[in-house]
Amino acid sequence: MISANNTSIIYRRLLSAIAIIGLFALSGCYSFKDISIPEDIKTVRVQYFENKARLFNPVLSPLLTDKLRQKVISQTRLTQVQGEDAHYDISGTITDCSVTTTGISNQQAASNRLNITVQIEFKNRKDESKNFEASITRNFDFNASLTLDQAQLQLQDEIIRNLSDEIFNRIFSNW
């Protein structure tokens, strides 16, 4: 004979199993990504992001452009094209790269901040009312004992990831 306590335990385990199975079943139906692309949009062009900043980092432009292209390919259904007829056209310019002191210790700089600004332009050839330009600035702190070149090398992956994420979210997220 099964006691009421054992029945309760069996019942809870059964409900837990059903809930887990339900989550797996629903995971194929719903995406947690907040990407909003109309069905009639099929192609995208991500143009080279030119670097016009006064503190020039020669690898920033190609790395940022490449990372954004990879992100668009991997996280959207859009096909990248090179022509002027792309439904979405993304371009940008690195307009500023500057350093400011953020911390002082014993009357010397202890920490610095690298500020990078990217001006983006988004064109929607199917709906020009959705076109926009935006300026994105991200800050990256580093130890003042590092030279600017050392800091940029140390922060390179974080800089590229953060800027490409911000640009992607500004264009494709519906929030």
Image (spheres, rainbow, N blue to C red):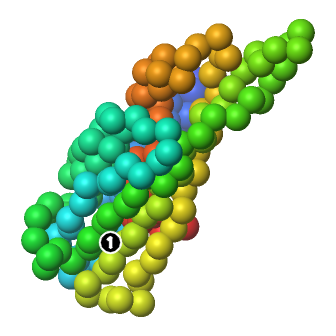
Kindly identify the amino acid type of the residue bearing the numbered disc 1: Ile
Where is residue 103, by image quadrant? top right
Residue 131 in the image, given as x and y percentages of width and height:
40, 81
Q: Decide which of 133, 98 is in the foreground and name it.
A: 98
Residue 161 seen in render: no
Q: Residue at x 48, y 54 (%)?
A: 95
Image quadrant of residue 84?
A: bottom left
Identify the residue shown where x is 47% and y is 61%: 119
- According to the image, label 1 marks what residue? 37
Q: Nearer the viewer, residue 88 or 73?
A: 88
Indicate left or right for 113 with 152 as reference: right
Q: Secondary structure at mark 1?
A: loop
Location of the C terminus (image quadrant): bottom right
- Farthest residue, direction front: 54
Q: Is residue 63 left or right of residue 93?
A: left
At x 32%, y 72%, the residue is 37
Residue 160 lies, with reference to residue 132, above or below; the image says above
Residue at screen point 24% across, 60% down: 47
